[in-house]
Amino acid sequence: MATVDYSLRGRIAVVAFQAPPVNSLGHAMRAGLVAALDRAAADAAVDGVVLIGGNGTFSAGADIREFGTPAMIRGPSLWTLNTALDAMPKPVVAAIEGVALGGGLELAMSCHHRVALATAKVGLPEVKLGLLPGAGGTQRLPRLIGVENALNVMLSGEPLPAPMFAKSPLFDRVVDADLLGAAVAVAEASAAALREGKKLPRARDLKVREPDLDGICQFARNTVKTAFKEYPAPLAIIDAVHFGATRPIDAGFAEEGRLFKQLMDGPVSAAMRHVFFAERAASRVAGLPEGTATRDIKAVGVIGAGTMGTGIAINFLNAGIPVRLLEVGQEALDKGVARIRQTYEGQVKKGKLDAAKLEARMALLAPTLSYADLGAVDLVIEAVFEDMGVKEKVFRQLDAVAKPGAILASNTSTLDVDQIAGFTGRPGDVIGLHFFSPANVMRLLEVVRGAKTAPDVLATAMALAKKIRKTAVVSGVCDGFIGNRMINQYSAQALQMLDEGASVEQVDGAIEKFGFAMGPFRMSDLAGNDIGFHIRKRQYAEGKLARKAVVADRLCEMGRFGQKTGAGWYDYKPGDRNAQPSKVVADLIDQARKEAGVTPRRLDDAEIVDRLVFALVNEGARILEEKIAQRASDIDLVYLTGYGFPMWRGGPMQYADSRTLYEVARRMQAFAALPGADSAFWTPAPLVARLAADGGSFNGGGA
Ligand code: 3HC
Ligand code: NAI
């Protein structure tokens, strides 16, 4: 709830505003602030005003929850508020602590003076929401800190320490303590100057001084064009600054407003706003009340020093948490330790880490061959071969040595976490922590909640994920959890389209144009085709796969595992990771079509993309129905942070929403009618069918 408190300190009105937790500037807050300014303007006992956030922070800007709703433009708008400040006959000082971001900083820039605590951070993060600062920021900031600095602030979107701008007109003073006292003093001095006939300083009255305006803007345009190909906001920011810098500020405001509306109404900002809320929603877990106690994690054990184990260990070493790394044999252990060191050395070479830090991190690593050495750690993560028999041995040994209360986690990508928990006498302490490869780089962590996982174990995993800077998404237990279960359907479609007439290059090319960093075949060559082969063999044996992946299986039988064997879906020249189209693979596909009696047909890019993405969506819907995922936005987050789904499309479920589920269901029905189609595969999941019929959406309600 927004409150605006008005009190007097001598002849200065102190307007303290609050809307916990971040004092966003929703309608009620804007109305309260305009009323307080009007009151101060009319109050004969008042010479000046201080605006201060009431709960340790200034403001995180516009209320993003209002975007796209009538409340966003309901008067008074931010625009009205800032115009009221421009028109104030008495000095107004913004007193900034915590953060002043977006509309919060724009509000402060509309005041006559700004005083900040040295610990405060300021920034214009609108670009991260696919927007530009739309309450005067593109015009006032260049006037206060110069064009180049202002572009850097707006294009990075990062919150920056206030002292960085202490010498610019952005701040009158940056103080270490007594923010309110300093702000009141500035207001009093300004009021005295006003009485002596001085004009009140306003950002809008400053001139933009930049002799090389065109050069700087062109340089910025070239930079963002390559860095943010699909994002319109960075270019719009530069355009707004460039336009306004040589014109009266009101013309600049008008252009800024036009561009802001255009971005706000576009699909990219809708997707980016969705991602903002998805990231925050993911930490809310059903049945886990806020404040659930967590266990202390002071030391971690990792079992298996292969690809994943080493990457997992690095996460904890980076966070300053000691790691005991266990292997079956000395050679594998030495190789694992060497791999960790090599990763750090690579970072030192790139200037991302210094040699002292490398050694400090390596000093936290204790390699071992003995389970007894895991007796004292608070969390053990197992990353051994993906084989239930091996996992059973590991968990039985762990159960024997781990101290009471230690969390026992598995990094399995497909196996049943409940079965694994059953190998111990403490299933409540067992959880899945599914990292993605490379585990020290990929942001996603699927936290797999077993049937018996204790609430404090789950809460600890979520808190720990934050500490090691991962995006944690909770998944229930099923084959492949959220991400891999869906990707199996996507891969099945990719293979099916080869059978029907598409080429490997065409499938990859179409989905890469859609925005994926890598198509399914290039990705598989990178990760190793043998991983899927191994999983398929198990699934054939369990009767879980209706169709045999003939071409993919033959590819692996030929030893074409991908980049690591110099050949996979593509050919590779020695020492070159560039994928070259393969005649061998084309012949293999051709042969399989002949054997199946298929006459190849031409598939266009739109069909390829829709079949790949809607295969994800249909499985995602089933995952929601089964409550494996808590919400559609969690699924989106899994795909954005773990599978290279284009961020600017907001994730598969959001993308489906943007196409409307009616259209999605119709496309699925059309795919079901194609020659040779698997009609069961393309039957819209009941949730898709219901939402399509009701006009609902995954993320907007009804799911
Ligand atoms: N509007 C509405 N809600 C907001 C918000 C905003 N501007 N900023 C944060 N919140 C909400 C979050 O959704 C979260 O809600 P929840 O608890 O219900 O999930 C809560 O505030 C706390 O946020 P965080 O979990 O992110 O808390 P942190 O302490 O980690 O971070 C922060 C605080 C640095 C302020 C961070 O929230 C942030 O960066 N916020 C976004 C700031 C932003 O983008 N501002 C620009 C808005 S657009 C604008 O101003 C347009 C203008 O130019 C016209
Ligand atoms: P890997 O083969 O690279 O490493 C496994 C390591 O475990 C080997 O070094 C092996 O010596 C060791 N090991 C085997 N049995 C052991 C035992 N009883 N005690 C101690 N160490 C033992 O395998 P990778 O790729 O690291 O996979 C490990 C686990 O992580 C698997 O469950 C896998 O499904 C999962 N995973 C793999 C991903 C990947 O992309 N590679 C992604 C996410 C999860």
Image (tube, grey):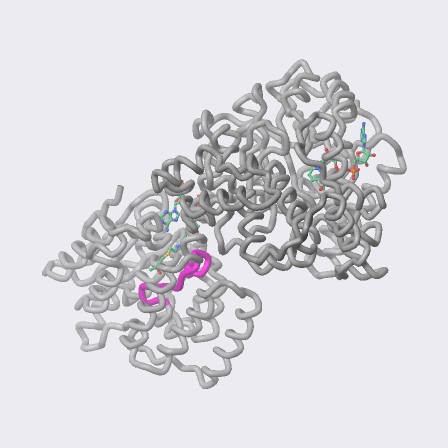
Residue at image location 80% in from the left, 61% down from the top = 576
Report the magenta residues as a range.
Answer: 123-137
Q: Is residue 546 left or right of residue 116?
A: right
The C terminus, quarter of image? top left
Q: Nearer the viewer, residue 562 or 594?
A: 594
Q: Position of residue 225 (x, y in %)?
A: 53, 70
Farthest residue toward the right? 331
Residue 196 locus on image (x, y percent)? 19, 76
Of residue 223 and residue 44, the one placed in the foreground of this image is 223
Q: Please determine whether, in this image, residue 107 is positioned above or below residue 218.
A: above
Q: Residue furthest bottom?
A: 211
In the drawing, does residue 200 fall left or right of residue 165?
Answer: left
Total number of numbered labels?
0
The answer to whether residue 357 is above or below residue 428 is below
**Which residue is nearer to you in this view: 558 or 392?**
558
Does any portion of residue 145 appear in the rendered image?
Answer: yes
> What residue do we see at 72% from left, 61% from top?
350
Q: Quadrant of the N terminus?
A: top left
Q: Is residue 191 left or right of residue 358?
A: left
The front one of 267 and 545 is 545
**Is 445 on the left or on the right of 112, as rendered?**
right
Q: Quadrant of residue 354?
A: bottom right
The quarter of the displayed image where residue 584 is located: bottom right
Q: Residue at x 67, y 17 (%)?
A: 422
Tell me where residue 633 appears, x and y as whole percent.
47, 41
Residue 14 shows in this picture? no
**Residue 134 included in the magenta stretch of the image:** yes
